Image: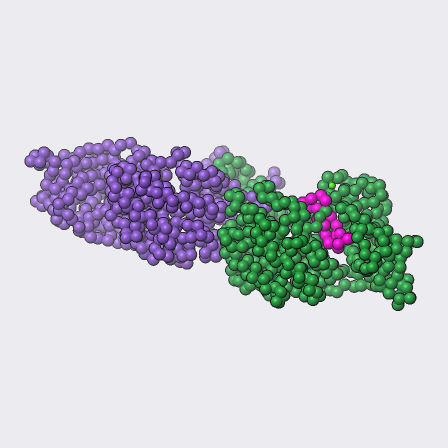
Chain colours: A purple, B green
Amino acid sequence: SDVAPSRCIIEGTKRVQCYRDGKDVYLPFDGFLKKQFDLTGRLINKGETDERFEYFTSYAKVRTPERLDYSPTAEFGNFRTYSVEFRDRVRCISAEYGVPMSTQWDTVPYFYPIQIAQYALQHYSRNVTDKAPKIVELEAEFDPSNGQKEVIADADGGLRLKLDPRPDFATISFSWKPADPSAAFSVTVEVLRLNKTITLIYKHVDDRRCVWAEGDVLSDTYGDGEDSPVNVEAKNKQELVFAYALGTSIDPSQFTTVVRDILVDTSKGLALVQLLPLTRKESSLPGGLKIGDVKLLSLSFSGRSTLKRPIRQMTSAHGEIFLRTADWFVTNQDEQGGWPVPVMRSIADNKLVLPAGWHSAMAQGHALSVLTRAYFLTKDIRYVNAAAASLSLFETPALEGGVMNKLFNHPWYEEYPTTPGSFVLNGFMYGLVGLYDFSTVIPHGNASKKLFDDGINSLKTFLPLYDTGFGSVYDLRHLGLKTAPNIARWDYHAVHIYLLKWLNTITNEKFFDEVAERWIGYATGKRAKHN
Amino acid sequence: SDVAPSRCIIEGTKRVQCYRDGKDVYLPFDGFLKKQFDLTGRLINKGETDERFEYFTSYAKVRTPERLDYSPTAEFGNFRTYSVEFRDRVRCISAEYGVPMSTQWDTVPYFYPIQIAQYALQHYSRNVTDKAPKIVELEAEFDPSNGQKEVIADADGGLRLKLDPRPDFATISFSWKPADPSAAFSVTVEVLRLNKTITLIYKHVDDRRCVWAEGDVLSDTYGDGEDSPVNVEAKNKQELVFAYALGTSIDPSQFTTVVRDILVDTSKGLALVQLLPLTRKESSLPGGLKIGDVKLLSLSFSGRSTLKRPIRQMTSAHGEIFLRTADWFVTNQDEQGGWPVPVMRSIADNKLVLPAGWHSAMAQGHALSVLTRAYFLTKDIRYVNAAAASLSLFETPALEGGVMNKLFNHPWYEEYPTTPGSFVLNGFMYGLVGLYDFSTVIPHGNASKKLFDDGINSLKTFLPLYDTGFGSVYDLRHLGLKTAPNIARWDYHAVHIYLLKWLNTITNEKFFDEVAERWIGYATGKRAKHN
Ligand SMILES: [Ca+2]
Ligand SMILES: [Ca+2]
């Protein structure tokens, strides 16, 4: 039948262009529906015979755990798909500590414990699931006097090692003992994509920038990539040098281990001078350099240091990276047993403010997941001690620096321990997973088990309040602030579903599965009934 | 630009017919959007140059109180727009008690205290806002021996009074003293719409049917109108007789007052034999007979009785009806101070069941609003005593027959005192209005004031939980039942808005107004933000 334009009047006021045929009235997707109902749609094969318009309620892919059971030594959730180091808000992997530094809420890079734990758990998970790395040992003139176990690089001319040119051997690892702060090492690579030679120099200085460009290249000081024009000097130069800070604290009697992913380190340098696009998309494929983009040329040492054999080049080093990061949690715990966030955080249009130094139940829980895995891997009691010392913050009220708020007299472990409480759902559930993980370290985890059980009871009590009938709320801030509810965007809704299924594998609590299934329905346009 | 059919694939599976032009893709309203998003729409002036499609999120008209202040002697909400007596679930106005009888949840008519109170408050409100009724006194041969104040209708031939033919004089009112149960009266009318003569006979019998057809006319026994075919005999007869039961309890020493709205009584008879369409639409204009449909012919008395002068015919009798109904609350209070609902009620797919005899905070609150107004009108202390005696049920837990459930240790006055609690919002707020009303009767209302204040605190605490970000929930049953939330349909959402504005006029609590304004926005398609 004929189709003709027709006017639609929305709520008595707004006009939009519609069509009408003999059967129905048709409303515009981009012109009205998309924004009104927060929808996703795209036209496929435009103009061809199989043209179609794909309509989705949620843009987010809903995932559920692959395993029906749960083990605190297995991979952690779907974190193996994370790429924490390539997130644009990660300025670099600290050369001094081997952990990511964030610029998310401050232009000066800082240690963000949640991000550091996710970095650890990502590498732990890949270590569990990925194939073992391929490794080559680099040749050097090792000293015959000690069984060819060491080589001394001295100030005169230094030591230069040729790197294996196979593109997937992008990680280098070695143990060295710098004699004094003048000792340094550097890696030179060719970036095929840009036709440039890049040198990364790692030196014993204290520099808050984490990574920076050397020479007469304008560098976006803190690398947030938002307020600097494309860097013309950097674009025109054939050779660029980026420096990483190793810190100035040296113990000349100790070997320390270095593990660097050269693709990551090169990417973070290039991003700094706007030579790589920054990606804004989290936990997807990296926006940085990929295997094949870079050819590793050489590893050089200057100043005086001793190197232990083997000096290795490898396709990955997930286990080493995990343990180095777990150690960060052991050596960076504060006197309350926490890993404080060193930047101020304000949420709810600045109605809720956490001054720098706050603790997060999500950080504490993630740390428990890291420390538990490190302990099971190494049986090193330091990890257990750190985990046990961290528990009291779960019982300490938000107003006293802890992560606990009472919600109608039930404990809630707060991702953001605000006053009044915000009761963020996903951070609470991550906290519970961490408490569960440590509770399996018998008998050290008994207090963790109690905190976990109490938290599960709270979750069972309050979970219905996060159900809007068409999606979920991110938190219950509206209880204290007396505002509209803070609807979870679809990717957080998907995280809620994943975590409920996850907790179901831990507790066998059918209710969590029922809610998860209903929420999966919401993500495909199902809605709760009205009366 | 050209418009052409295009296929839409909904959530990867369902196909619907769409259109596409050079600018956008257009989705079908009836074919998809209406049901998916619970929308309302209609095509206006189809095919004409000013054709338009009117799109609304909510089908319900949002109303707010006209007054910015509130007085417990002013009209009650917008109840003056109610037509309780014409609701199809009101079988009839009991001739014995002068109050409506319901068939909503049982086929046998029963007293439903919420409905009875709404009937009282409707007439109270109309008495406040409407013009005074026009009244004529019927002529009769009053006895000169007592100053022409009385007339005796005796068994021989009886007394027949001609009625005023003006169509708006549809209510009759008189006081009489029947000598024995054989005394009766009847009203004969002509229904112009149907061209039939109808006689309504009011007699001293006990009959559970409230109203019924006499003679050889098939009568839908309990008048629910749902399981009987159109009544052919009734359709073909020129004269029909319907009977109303006055009960058999007679005090021959007492005059009793009769007030009957003949339009209502005729309508309820005709509905019984399917000669009038039953309306399913509540609180809108009656589906029964309207002024002008009926011509009143005569009022007759049979058996022996004494009538007091004046015998009146009037355009309305709101004040009399209100007080007669208020008296029902005084004389029908149970030993707990309540007005029990005599039928079983089950909600939430029978997961929550209230056995017959349950109390409702909505009934109790409405009763307080009725009794407070009756007291202010008459200064009769019986109304205060009944109100005071009713308060303890607000403090009595649901499990002990009261109307109170604790919600996280805060009291909630339950419209349906289920276990676990259902926490219906609108009934709670009506209960609060009733408590407030009686709290203004100083000093008798002090306990009522305390209950009101406690309830307002609970409302302030929990109101955010009723906000879904796109509408409101009807109750919090999902907290106890662990189910999906029970979304309020749009007319209940509008009731929530009205009541929040109403409580704002009582308390000056800005929060109630903020929520009401946000919820008005939801009814016109606004939605809370996601993060
Ligand atoms: Ca910058
Ligand atoms: Ca029937």
Give x and y (percent) for residue A422.
42, 53
* Left or right: residue A492 compared with residue B478: left
Return the x and y of residue A517 as percentages of the image width and height. Answer: 48, 38
Q: Quadrant of residue A27?
A: top right
Q: Is residue B462 above or below residue A86?
A: below
Q: Left of B240 or right of it: where is A288?
A: left
Is residue A278 at all visible to an observer of this figure?
no
Residue B442 vs residue A194, the one in the foreground: B442
Q: Which residues are magenta?
A: B91-108
Image check: A249 left or right of B512? left
Q: Is residue B98 magenta?
A: yes
**Residue under the image location 73 percent in, 54 percent down:** B99
**Residue at the extreme front:** B335
Viewer-proximal residue among B53 and B317: B317
Q: Main secondary structure of the magenta part?
A: loop
- Residue A459 lies left or right of residue B161; in this view the side is left
Residue at (20% x, 36% y) in the render: A313
Task: Count how many numbered circles sit on residues in the image.
Answer: 0
Q: Residue B392 is drawn in which quadrant? A: bottom right
Q: Position of residue A141 (x, y in %)?
A: 10, 36
